[in-house]
Image (tube, helix red, strand yellow):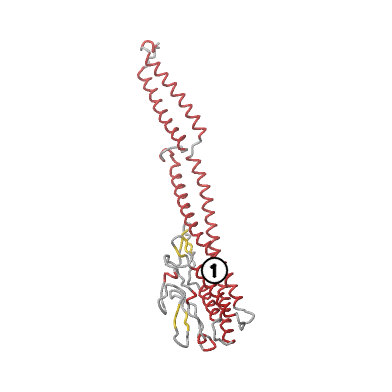
Amino acid sequence: MVSRVSVIGVLTQNLSVITQSRKQLDRLNYSLATGQNFQELKFYGQDAARIVDLRKDIEARQSYIRSIEVTQSTTSSYDAILESLVEMTSSALSAAEPLSSQDIDFPTTTTVLANNFMLELEANLNIKLGDRFIFAGSNFGTAPVTDLRTLTLYNTTDLVSNGAVANTIETADTLPQHTVDAGGAATVESYLTGFTGAGTIDSNAYARLRVTISDKQPVNYNLRATEPAFQNLVEGLLRLKSAAQAGLTEDEREEFLGDARNALDTARTQLRQLQASNGTILNELERTSQIHKGFITISQTALDDMTVADEAEVAVRISSLQNQLEASFTTIARQSQLTLVNFLR
């Protein structure tokens, strides 16, 4: 039985093998150059959808981490500022409990101390991170607190013993205000720069800022200069400074000092409460950030298992393919030189 072999058929078959090998070699060279198994998702077959989902999840969580890090810079600043203000309030309380308010140096010393405390409070509440004043609510571009040293001192008509009404804490959306010279001009003032007169409304000063740190996990995180703790702190410092003015009787001076201590003590408690609430937010931010980072690590590992090429394995496969191609080229060259008779022998 004689078998007839087509030279054209054999050459065509070898050329087809070479073409496929060249394509495979191109993919392997791409893998070696980029570290990725394939250039297009379609080559990953049933893993393609999984790869897309993992990449989307990783990108989303990286975005959440960036938002968390920005928020952490603000909440960490709050924590440091609140701690500083608690210490300052304790110092102010000590100043409001002198050994003797009749000491000849009391007015001068207390006025200097009160002004320094006011400067420190103003500086802290006007802290700016980047382009935002962090205690201004949503009035980001405006420092919220005025120079506290310019506030008018209370006088004896502002003492409860003389019929005055104690200052009340304002709530949204009325800006904090207080009345001085209640028995005379009854001037209404405020420690906030946005104040334009009695009953000034500014919802932006009370605005709560919110950040989403994970799917369906929003967090309100900002503190405002309108917080009751700061209202009481300003009131306490103003009462302390008012106690140092000339012309007061011992009883009047002591009443101012007593009012100052009450306001400062309340402020210190409220500052600690703000610090605790802010600490809870800090913990939530850190915990959520770690969850995201852990997920990204696991997901990236799974993604790498599907997409990242093993360089050593790729190099071996490239070497093997190159050998096969050389053999195929050699075979074709030899076959092309044979006559039909010699090839059929």
**Mark 1 Cα-neighbour bin, 10 Å: few <14, some 14–19, many ≥20:** some
The number of callouts visible is 1
Which of 32/40 is in front? 32
- Residue 19 placement (x, y as % from top left): 39, 27
Which of 338/144 is in front? 144
* Residue 183 in the figure: left or right of residue 271: left
Residue under pointer 1: 274
- Residue 243 placement (x, y as % from top left): 55, 81
- Residue 113 placement (x, y as % from top left): 56, 74
Q: Secondary structure at mark 1?
A: helix
> Which residue of the protein is positioned furthest toward the right in this rendering?
99
Which of 67/328 is in front? 67
Which residue is at 48% across, 62% downward? 219
Which image quadrant for residue 269?
Answer: bottom right
Vertical relation: 203 (above or below) 294: below
Which residue is at 43% across, 61% downward? 131
Badge 1 amino acid:
Leu
Vertical relation: 101 (above or below) 13: below
- Residue 213 placement (x, y as % from top left): 48, 58
Could you tell me which quadrant the N terminus lies in?
top left
Which residue is at 57% across, 72% downward? 89
Could you tell me which quadrant the C terminus lies in?
top left
